[in-house]
C-alpha cells in the first residue's frame, strides 16, 4: 500500500502572527500618562514589538535549529519548549538560546525563550507541584506548558512583590495591601488583588505568569500564589517606566530604538484567575519548593548565561572596534582592558560547557545542567557587566561625546563633520555610528537600564554569592584541611 507523506503542521508563529496577536484583546498598558491597547500603534513601543517579531521569524529562517516535532502530535514547535531528557537535548536547546540572543546581541533579556524554559522545567517536574495534595495545580501547569508551546505564546513574569519595606514580611507591609494576594474565590476561579514589581516585556507579551520569587511565612498562605493569565484580563493593569525607545532614529540610538523591552509594574485590581490557570494557591512550603526542587535554578541560568555570553561577546566586539578606530588599541593597557572583557567571555563560555559536561538526569527524569558553574557566575556576572561598561568607557574616552546626530551628519554641517570626525580606522560616519552604538550600550538610558538589569534580574549578587556558599558541597575542601588537623 502506498504511503502518503504529510507535512507537519507548524505551530511556531511568524513575526506577523505574533504582531497580530498583540492587537487582540483589551490590554491596559499605561505609558507616560497614556493608555495603550496595541503597542504597534504607539511610536514608543512599536519598534520593540517589531524586534520581537524578528525573534519569531527566526524560527522560520532556522527551522533545523529552532523547531522540533511536538512530543504530542509531531507538529513543529519551538525548541526552547523542550523538556530535556539527554545531554544532546540540553546542547540543542542552548544552540537555540544562542541564535535567539544573537538577534538582539543579548540586549533583550526576556525574549520568550526565558519563560519557555521556565515552564518546560516546571512541567517536567510536575511531581514537585503535586506535593501536599496539589495534583490539580500540577495538572494545570502541565497543560499550560503545552498551551504555551502550541500557541507559541510570548510570556512575561512577575515574581517579586513591590518594595514597600523589605525588612518585613509581605503581610505586614502597608497593612498587607500592596503585595499580590488572594482575596476570595468566585465560581470561575480565585480573585487576586495587589501588585507585583516589574514584568519586563509586558506590552509585548500575550500572557503574564506569576510564580514564586521569595519565601513566604507559613501563616501567609494568601500570598503564596502561582498562575498565568492573558495580559488582556479585566482588572489587570501595567504601569510602564519611561520609554527609552522614544521613537528615536536607528542611526542615533541603534539599540534603544530597537531593543527597549520595557519594564512595567503589574497591578491586579480584583482579577479573576480561572481555576485551570491556578498552579499553586495557599501552600507556603510548596511556594519555596517549586524554586528549589523543580530544577528551575539550573535551567533558567542555562538560558540566562547563554544570553549573557552573547552580550559579552558583543561588548568585546564594540571594544575591539573602538580601540582600532582611534588607534588606542596599540597601547598595552588598552589591550589588557580588552583582554579583561575577553576573559569574561571565555569564562562564561567555559561555565556553559562545564554545566553541560556535568549534566545528569534528575530524580524526576529531566536532564539537569550541573548548576555549580552557574551559581558561581550568578554571583560574578552582576559585577562583570558594570565592569565591562567601565572598561568600554576607558577605551572610548571622550569620543562618546563626539557623536553628532543623524540630522547633523546629513545636514548643512555635514561636510565639516566628514573632515573633522574622521578617525584613523574609520571615516566620519562609521566612527560616529560606532561611538553612538557604544554609548547606547554603556551610557544612554537604555545602557543604564541594561546595567541595572544585569545587577538584579536574577536577584542581587550579594545574596546569590552567599547562597552559593551556603549550598556548596564543602566535603572535599574540609577533607583537605582535616588531614592536617589529625596528628
Ligand atoms: C531592569 C529590571 C528588570 C526586571 N524584570 C523583572 C521581571 O520581568 N520579572 C520579575 O519578576 N522581576 C524583574 N525584576 C526584578 C528583580 O527580580 C528584582 O530587582 C530582584 O529580585 C531584586 O529585588 P529588588 O529589586 O526588589 O531589590 P531589593 O530586594 O529591594 O534589594 C535592594 C537592596 O537591598 C538589599 N536587600 C534587600 N533585602 C535584603 C535582605 N533580606 N537581606 C540583605 N539585603 C537585602 C539587596 O541586596 C539590594 O542591595 C527586574 C529588575 C530589573 C532591575
Image: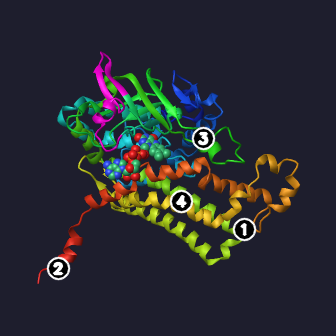
Label 1, on which residue? Answer: 326
| Circle 2 residues within 10 Å: few <14, some 14–19, many ≥20 | few
The local secondary structure at tag 2 comes to loop
> Closer to us: mark 2 or mark 3?
2
Q: Which residues are magenta?
A: 165-193
Q: Identify the residue at image location x=30%, y=17%.
A: 186
The local secondary structure at tag 1 comes to loop
Label 4, on which residue? Answer: 312
Q: Identify the residue at image location x=85%, y=47%.
A: 411
Where residue 435 appears, x then y in whole percent? Answer: 69, 58
Label 3, on which residue? Answer: 51
Q: Nearer the viewer, residue 352 or 202?
A: 202
Q: CA distance from mark 1 to mark 4?
A: 21 Å
Instruction: Answer whether residue 81 is visible to the viewer in this image.
Output: no
Where residue 59 appears, x then y in whole percent? Answer: 54, 42
- Could you tell which of marks 2 and 3 lies nearer the N-terminus? 3
Q: Would the CB of label 4 be found within 8 Å of ligand 1? A: no
Q: Is residue 460 above or below residue 75?
A: below
Q: Are marks 2 and 1 in contact (CB under 8 Å)?
A: no
Q: Residue furthest bottom?
A: 487
- Could you tell which of marks 4 and 3 lies nearer the N-terminus? 3
Residue 341: mark: none
Where residue 197 appears, x then y in whole percent? Answer: 42, 37
Residue 438 appears left or right of 4: right
Q: Are marks 4 and 2 in contact (CB under 8 Å)?
A: no
Q: CA distance from mark 4 to mark 3?
A: 20 Å
Indicate whether residue 179 is drawn in magenta. Answer: yes
Amino acid at each position: 500500500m502506498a504511503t502518503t507523506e504529510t507535512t507537519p503542521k507548524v505551530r511556531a508563529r511568524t513575526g506577523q502572527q505574533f504582531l497580530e496577536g498583540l492587537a487582540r484583546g483589551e490590554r491596559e498598558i499605561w505609558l507616560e500618562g497614556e493608555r495603550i491597547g496595541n503597542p504597534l500603534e504607539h511610536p514608543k513601543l512599536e519598534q520593540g514589538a517589531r524586534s520581537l517579531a524578528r525573534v519569531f521569524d527566526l524560527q522560520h529562517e532556522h527551522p533545523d535549529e529552532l523547531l522540533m516535532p511536538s512530543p504530542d502530535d509531531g507538529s513543529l514547535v519551538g525548541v526552547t519548549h523542550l523538556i530535556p531528557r539527554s545531554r544532546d537535548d540540553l546542547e540543542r536547546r542552548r544552540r537555540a538560546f544562542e541564535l535567539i540572543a544573537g538577534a538582539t546581541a543579548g540586549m533583550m533579556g526576556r525574549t520568550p525563550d526565558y519563560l519557555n524554559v521556565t515552564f518546560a522545567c516546571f512541567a517536567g517536574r510536575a511531581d514537585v507541584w503535586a506535593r501536599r495534595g496539589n495534583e490539580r495545580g500540577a495538572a494545570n501547569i502541565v497543560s499550560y506548558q503545552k498551551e504555551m508551546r502550541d500557541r507559541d505564546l510570548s510570556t512575561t513574569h512577575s515574581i517579586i512583590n513591590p518594595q514597600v519595606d523589605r525588612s518585613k514580611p509581605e503581610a505586614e507591609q502597608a497593612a498587607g495591601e500592596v503585595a499580590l494576594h488572594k482575596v476570595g474565590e468566585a465560581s470561575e476561579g480565585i480573585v487576586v488583588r495587589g501588585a507585583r514589581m516589574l514584568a519586563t516585556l509586558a506590552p509585548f507579551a500575550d500572557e503574564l505568569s506569576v510564580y514564586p520569587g521569595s519565601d513566604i511565612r507559613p501563616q501567609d498562605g494568601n500570598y503564596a500564589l502561582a498562575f498565568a493569565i492573558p495580559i488582556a484580563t479585566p482588572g489587570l493593569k501595567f504601569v510602564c517606566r519611561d520609554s527609552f525607545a522614544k521613537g528615536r532614529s536607528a542611526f542615533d540610538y541603534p539599540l534603544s530604538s530597537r531593543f527597549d523591552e520595557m519594564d512595567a509594574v503589574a497591578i491586579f485590581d480584583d482579577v479573576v484567575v480561572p481555576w485551570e490557570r491556578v498552579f499553586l494557591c495557599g501552600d507556603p512550603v510548596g511556594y519555596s519548593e517549586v524554586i528549589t526542587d523543580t530544577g528551575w535554578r539550573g535551567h533558567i541560568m542555562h538560558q540566562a548565561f547563554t544570553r549573557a555570553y552573547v552580550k559579552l561577546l558583543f561588548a568585546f566586539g564594540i571594544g575591539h572596534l573602538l580601540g582600532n578606530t582611534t588607534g588606542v588599541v596599540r597601547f598595552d593597557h588598552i589591550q589588557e582592558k580588552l583582554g579583561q572583557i575577553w576573559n569574561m567571555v571565555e569564562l562564561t563560555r567555559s561555565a556553559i560547557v562545564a554545566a553541560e559536561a556535568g549534566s545528569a538526569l534528575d530524580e524526576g527524569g529531566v536532564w539537569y545542567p550541573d548548576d555549580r558553574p552557574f551559581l558561581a557566575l550568578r554571583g560574578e556576572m552582576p559585577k562583570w557587566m558594570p565592569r565591562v561598561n567601565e572598561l568600554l568607557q576607558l577605551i572610548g574616552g571622550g569620543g562618546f561625546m563626539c557623536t553628532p546626530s543623524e540630522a547633523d551628519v546629513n545636514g548643512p554641517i555635514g561636510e565639516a563633520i566628514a573632515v573633522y570626525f574622521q578617525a584613523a580606522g574609520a571615516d566620519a560616519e562609521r566612527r560616529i555610528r560606532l561611538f553612538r552604538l557604544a554609548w547606547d550600550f554603556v551610557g544612554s538610558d537604555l545602557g543604564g537600564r541594561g546595567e541595572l538589569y544585569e545587577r538584579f534580574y536574577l536577584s542581587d549578587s550579594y545574596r546569590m554569592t552567599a547562597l552559593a556558599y551556603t549550598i556548596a558541597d564543602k566535603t572535599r575542601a574540609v577533607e583537605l584541611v582535616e588531614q592536617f588537623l589529625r596528628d
